[in-house]
Every structure is written in C-alpha cells, then in structure tokens.
Amino acid sequence: MQKIDLNKKTILVTGSAGFIGSNLVKRLFKDVKGATIVGIDNMNDYYDVSLKEYRLKTLLNSPCLGRTSDTSPQQGETERGCDYHFVKGDIADKATIDALFEQYQPQVVVNLAAQAGVRYSITNPDAYIQSNLIGFYNILEACRHHPVEHLVYASSSSVYGSNKKVPYSTDDKVDNPVSLYAATKKSNELMAHAYSKLYNIPSTGLRFFTVYGPAGRPDMAYFGFTNKLVKGETIQIFNYGNCMRDFTYVDDIVEGVVRIMQGAPEKKQGEDGLPLPPYAVYNIGNNNPENLLNFVDILQQELIRAKVLPEDYDFDAHKQLVPMQPGDVPTTYADTSALERDYGFKPSTSLREGLRAFAEWYAKFY
C-alpha cells in the first residue's frame, strides 16, 4: 500500500453537497492542514434542494476554513485549516470536469457524485446513465490525463444483488444485478479496473451499506418513514418486515473513506513487464444486519424521545406490511474483514445511537 499524506494536497470531492460528500468535506476541514479542497455538485432536485443548500452553507461557514487562497499569511501566522472552492456543475459535462482538473490539478479524487436509489432507477433510468456512467467516465478520463495519486469512488452494496451467501464478501462474484442502479455501480468498478490497468491509476472502490444519519437522504427508509409519520400518513414495510439491512452510520462511512484515501493500492510491474492494476474494492458496512421491524421500533422510540412525535402516537394504525418490491433484496450484510486487515477499522455505531442523532437533528431542522 502506498501511503498518502493529505496535508497540503489538492483534494477533489464530487457530490460535495450530498449526504456523504458534505460529511467528508467537513471531516477534511477538521483533520487536514493546508489543503485545497474542491467540491463539485450539480445541486439537482432528486430530493429537497434545501437540504443540499443547508449542507453547503454549513461547509462554507465552517470555522475550520483557513485563509482563502488569495490572501497571504501575516507575519508569524501559520497556515491552518483548508481552502474550500465550490463549483456548481455536473460531472456528466466533460468540459466542466476537464476545466476543473486543468485549473486545480487535484492529487486525490473522491467521486461520490452519483444518481442514487434503487427505486428511482426503475422510473428514471436516464439519470443513472448520465451521472453514473458518463459522469464517472469523465472523471476517469481526467485522472488519466493528470497525475492523480489516488482515485477513491463510491460503489454500493447493491452490486451483490440477491446473493445468497452472507456476509457479502468482495471476493464474491457479483454478476447478477437486480436493478439498473446496481448495474451502473458494478460498471464503475469494471471501468476503474480497466483504467487502473491501462494507465496505472491507483483506484479504490467502496461498497457502502445503507448509510443513514442527520441531514441524510429523504428517499431513504428512516427519513421517508419519519416524514410520513409526522404527517399522519401510513408507512409501508416491505417483504412484510422480513428484510435485514446492514445500517451504517454516516460518521463510520466517512472514517472509512478518510483512512482509505491515505492508502492507495501500490503500483507494481507484472511478469510481462506491464503494470499490474493498482486496484482495490472494500465493503464499508456495520457487519451487523438489523431486522426492518426492529429498526422501525427503535426509530419510533427515538422520534418520541426527541419530541418529533407525541408519546401517545398510535404506530400500529400507521403501519402496513406489504410484499417485496422490484429491485429490492431481502438481506444486506457486509464482510468487513479486508477493511479491518488493511486499514485497522470496523464501523461500530449502534442503530440506536445513530437513529437518536438523526431524530435530534430532525427535531431541530424541521
């Protein structure tokens, strides 16, 4: 593994006003000194744009930001924090990405921009081809033409499809996606492998497992359920509640990403004198699947505790058990042994801790 010191580097984070992206940038502000962080996001309306604006505003007002790049340090002042440059743009626009790489010359790239969600890929497939395939291709091409030390990109637990073997290991064959979203994420891994092999670009794919937390995505179950319960609407629990999900708190995801950014797959020559692809894929999940009914039970307790819902709320009247829907899978369960072995990290935030943080945030925000 090639160690990378993030201090004083130029780091590009795509999807930087997104849920994981904004939390990653916030963490980099805190931990990395003298870096230039460039964020790009198209601020699309796949979900409530005010959430993206809230995250972006939090970043731009961060006390951890150092000097802006056009001021010099005063005598005796040490450079602290990071410079942050935000670009409103779409990674599917090649000219935008080429200009961005030309201007900033990023050394570490974290590609989190993507059209997310399994269900939406059934109703709006075009968005997935644009962002997840064309957008990622533009990132790979730009990395090919610039000296990038490490490309880290988001894959998804969805690539495992209806894999019967659990926990899911990165050694498993993942050739049977059950949604277009999953197919685009598997394609990203294949494209990255080809570019790693052809152009010796160190790349690491991260298969995220059901990420949740404060200021998350409203299309995710915990957030959507909360919105409906607050309005007195009925929530639908799929597969009659017989689903297991490896819920992973966003801070654990970010911890994993930051560690992996600092350790790129090593460049090596093969016996044929050609480069072996400096390529890796890891799961980042809680390694502890929870039953959906148990998850809903903890969520309702925490929503009452945070006073989002009244103590006498009748949950049974607002719950409906329904069959499985297309594109969904009954279980997700991450084998994180490779992450532990190579980076000494295993996510550990309990579901109650994570949902409590979400409920308290929700009470403040709404």
Image: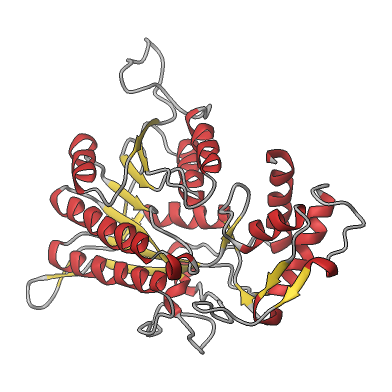
Q: Going by the image, does 306 lie left or right of 66?
A: right
- Image location (x, y in percent) of residue 149: 25, 51
- Image location (x, y in percent) of residue 136: 28, 58
Relative vertical location of residue 264 with respect to residue 240 in this rendering, above or below: above
Q: Nearer the viewer, residue 338 or 44?
A: 44
**Residue farthest to the bottom?**
164
Count of number-bearing discs: 0
Q: Nearer the viewer, residue 5 or 243?
A: 243
Residue 36 visible to an observer of this rendering:
no
The image quadrant of residue 235 is: bottom right
Q: Nearer the viewer, residue 117 or 247?
A: 117
The quadrant of the image that shows the C terminus is top right
- Image location (x, y in percent) of residue 362: 70, 46
Q: Going by the image, does 58 lie left or right of 1?
A: right
**Residue farthest to the right?**
312
The image quadrant of residue 314 is: bottom right
- Image location (x, y in percent) of residue 30: 50, 37
Relative vertical location of residue 189 with respect to residue 363 in this rendering, above or below: below
* Color encoding of the figure: secondary structure
Residue 215 visible to an observer of this rendering:
yes
Q: Residue at x 41, y 77 (%)?
A: 170
Q: Residue at x 37, y 11 (%)?
A: 74
Q: Residue at x 47, y 52 (%)?
A: 46
Relative vertical location of residue 81 with respect to residue 119 in this rendering, above or below: above
Q: Going by the image, does 361 lie left or right of 47?
A: right
**Residue farthest to the top?**
75
The quadrant of the image that shows the N terminus is bottom left
